Image: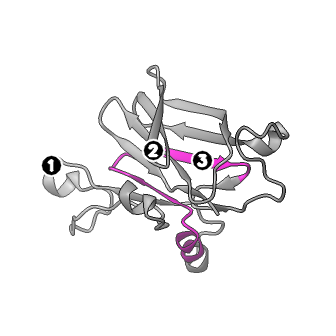
């Protein structure tokens, strides 16, 4: 997936299983084991139009089965968004206003098991923070402003192998 993102493709992440047993997200009922992926959709309304709009806007995230809650935003723009380049935007090292040189990445995670780590993936580079055995984590990180073509997404890994991936936030 990162190769496609690095080539400029813009995707929203969703998960799904290959189960056809009539129990979406509960593949263990049919197989007795295994995990089925889940698609999480952050829609403004719970009707067809709201869900379709959220899918088209990439306001989604994926899990490999657990019902993990994940919310990510940069400067108030939620996962899947495209960040416009600000007028007069500073480039790193120019010594311009810090508000123009940096952005605020906010995240909230509620796991179904203790969280092993959260990976911040920025255009293929990974920085991790330990979960320290907590099942809920939230925070704000100041990051250097995304440059045109860059993206950021979060990957949450639980101690039990459960995981979630936010849709990337893209810089125009």
Label 3 sits on a secondary structure element that is: strand
Could one spot residue 1 in this view of the protein? no
Which residue is labeled 3 in the image? 72
Of residues 151 and 35, which is closer to you in this image?
151
Which percent across, then down, holds residue 20? Answer: 21, 69
Residue 63 shown left or right of residue 49 in the figure: left
Q: Residue furthest left?
A: 31
Circles 1, 2 touching at the beta carbon (< 8 Å): no
Label 1 sits on a secondary structure element that is: loop
Q: CA distance from mark 3 to mark 1?
A: 33 Å
Which residue is labeled 2 in the image? 68
Whether residue 50 is situated above or below residue 2 in the rendered picture = below
Magenta span: 51-76
Whether residue 172 is situated above or below residue 68 in the rendered picture = below
Which residue is labeled 1 in the image? 32
Label 2 sits on a secondary structure element that is: loop
Circles 3, 1 touching at the beta carbon (< 8 Å): no
Q: Earlier in the sequence, mark 1 or mark 2?
A: 1
Could one spot residue 108 in this view of the protein? yes
Residue 65 shown left or right of residue 6 in the figure: left
């Amino acid at each position: 997936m990162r190769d496609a993102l690095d080539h400029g493709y813009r995707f929203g992440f969703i998960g799904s299983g290959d189960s056809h047993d009539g129990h979406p997200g509960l593949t263990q009922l049919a197989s007795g084991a295994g995990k089925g992926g889940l698609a999480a959709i952050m829609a403004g309304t719970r009707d067809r139009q709201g869900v379709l709009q959220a899918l088209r806007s990439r306001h989604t995230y994926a899990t490999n089965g657990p019902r993990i809650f994940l919310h990510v935003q940069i400067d108030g723009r939620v996962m899947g968004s495209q960040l416009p380049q600000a007028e007069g935007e500073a480039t790193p090292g120019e010594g311009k206003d810090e508000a123009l040189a940096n952005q605020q990445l906010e995240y909230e995670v509620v796991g179904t098991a203790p969280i092993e780590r959260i990976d911040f993936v920025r255009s293929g580079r990974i920085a991790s923070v330990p979960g320290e055995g907590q099942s809920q984590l939230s925070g704000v990180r100041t990051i250097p402003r995304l440059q045109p073509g860059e993206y950021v997404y979060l990957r949450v890994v639980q101690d039990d192998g459960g995981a979630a991936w936010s849709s990337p936030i893209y810089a125009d």
